[in-house]
Structures are given as structure tokens and as C-alpha cells.
Image: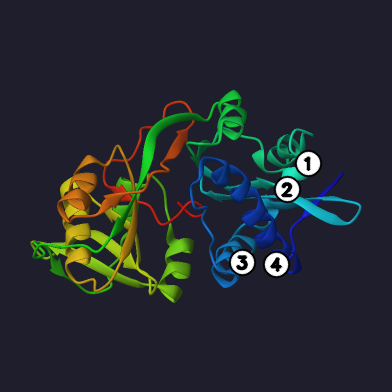
Amino acid sequence: MDVRPTVADDLPVMHRLFLAAIGSVYEPHDFEPPAPPAEVFASNHGHLLATDPERCFVAASDGEVVGYVAAWLRGDDWFLGSLFIAPPVHGRGVGSRLLDAVWGDGDVRRRTLTDAIQPVSNALYARRGLVPSTPLLTFVGFPAGAEPTLAVGNDASVADIDLRAYGFDRAADHRYWGEIAERTVWLRDGKPVAYSYRFPAGAIGPVAGLDAGAAAAALAGELARVVGPVVVRIPGSSRALVLGALAAGLRLSPTPGLLLLSEGLAPPDALAIGGYTLF
């Protein structure tokens, strides 16, 4: 088994591997697995290759890619974005080797998101100190949004919002999100208090605020102007946003995720995430 850095030419086979791996988790439960288009998958992982190439690896056996991992670091905050293994090689230690490759040294704050129906992966992460802290709830449907209570502002700095909602800087990711989605900065009394992203296919997030009320108001404002179906992923700890999604008539997906955190980290309360890979 050879573990080597990921290159751009690996992305198509990684996409096929992801579809097979996630299908092996969802289909035995009669759930429809996630199936991102190849171009969306390549865009997400291409961003990680551009910003964190030293934390992207594949595992190959006889020249065939049988697993991959991608993590990213923002200051002292580390996030495991992807770790998937081809079903035929499950149980052979491939996941542990890939996780070793991206784990790194130093006292960093660690996070990851998993599917709640993946007991093997969740146990692997928990043994390393990444413990489930709150569910990740996916809401879908056609929203019946209320009138916005925040004003729409200019494209002001959102660094303070990121520090409050995430706990770390997300400037590199804002540059990426801004290329593929529409961002709105929301104002209260003339000051930026929240932001939201809306993607062409209907996904909303991240949505972040200086406080839970601001984040929930930003989500309500985004839902009020959407035409068509949406998907929003909200940590259960962000209670105000969960209540807002329910008030808008969205329904819960039957396959929740889990937010895993290292010791000392508190779950977010003013955030809807941007997705499993980029949080």
C-alpha cells in the first residue's frame, strides 16, 4: 500500500470512489446516498489542493487509488474534510494510515463532520479524541420565509463574524465561496452582524452571525427571497437557526450527521455550515 500526496489528476477517480464508499453506507439502510456532480466534487477538493496540498493524500494498491483523505488548517484550527475508503479494502487499516498522514503535530483544535450511520468511522475518530458533540441536521424543501428583519449591506469585512461563529479565520474560504455563490452581508443598526451564502442549485450556507439571533435572522432573510427548493445544514447546537428552518416549513432529512470536536471546543450556536468538506 502506497500513501502519496494527491494530485489534480486523482480527482475523477476520487469522485468515483466517494460515490461507491458513501453508497455502501447509505444503501443498506435504504437511504439515498449523496451524489454530488463530478464538477462540484472537483471544485471542493481542488480548493483544498490549492490551499492545503500538504494535507491531501491518496492510498494506492498496485497503482489503483483505494482511499483518499483531505484536511485543512486555518491557524491553529484543523478540520478533517474527507476520508473515504473503497469498500473492497475496508478493514485493512487504510483509513488509519491516511489519517496518520494528515494528523500532524502540535496543539491544534480539531473538528470533523461524519454521518451518524457510520459507526466504524466515528469510533476511529473518537479514539483520537474527536468525540460527537452535536448532531448536524439537514433541512430540505420549499421555504415559506418571513420578511427579513436585518438590512442588506455592502460587502464589508466579516472577520469578526467568523471569529464569533467559527472561532477562526475563514478568509481563504471566503475567496473560494465568493467565486461560486452569492454572499450577502446583513446589517443591524448599520453594522455587519451576519452573512449568508446562496448557491445556484439551492444550497444555503454557510450562514454565520455575531450572535444566534443575527444568524437566525440572516437565514430567515435568505429563505424569504429563495424561489425553489433549498438545502440547509445546521448543527443542532444552533437552536435559533433550527427553529427558523422549521418555521419556514423545511423538513428534516432522515440521515443526520455528527459534529465531532476535540476536548475544550464548544459546539457552534450561530452557524449553518457550508458543507461536509469545508464546514
Mark nearer the N terminus (1 vs 4): 4
Give, as a three-letter code, the residue at label 4: Pro
- The kind of secondary structure element at disc 4 is helix
Question: How far apart, in angstroms, are the residues tagged by discs 1 and 3?
Answer: 25 Å
> Does 53 appear above or below 123?
below
Rendered image: mark on residue 185: none
The way the protein has been coloured in the rendering is: rainbow
First in sequence: mark 4 vs mark 2: 4
Secondary element at image label 3: helix
The label number, if any, that marks residue 46 in the structure image: 3
Label 2 crowd bin: few (<14), some (14–19), many (20+), radius 10 Å: many
For marks 3 and 2, give the CA distance.
21 Å
Residue indicated by mark 4: 12
Q: Is residue 220 above or below residue 106?
A: below
Place residue 26 in its image quadrant.
top right
Q: Marks 1 and 4, Cα distance to the nearest angstrom?
A: 19 Å
Quadrant in which the N terminus appears: top right
Q: Nearer the viewer, mark 1 or mark 3?
A: 1
Mark 3 or 2: the one toward you: 2
Q: Pick the residue in front: 220 or 248.
A: 248
Of callouts 1 and 3, the N-terminal one: 3
> In the displayed structure, would residue 262 be above or below residue 71?
above
Front position among marks 4 and 2: 2
| x and y percentages locating residue 129 in the rendered image | 55, 26
Instruction: Name the residue that disc number 2 marks.
Output: 86
Identify the element where label 1 is drawn: helix
Mark identifier at residue 89: 1
Q: Is residue 86 visible?
A: yes
What's the distance in space between the residues labelled 4 and 2, CA to CA? 14 Å
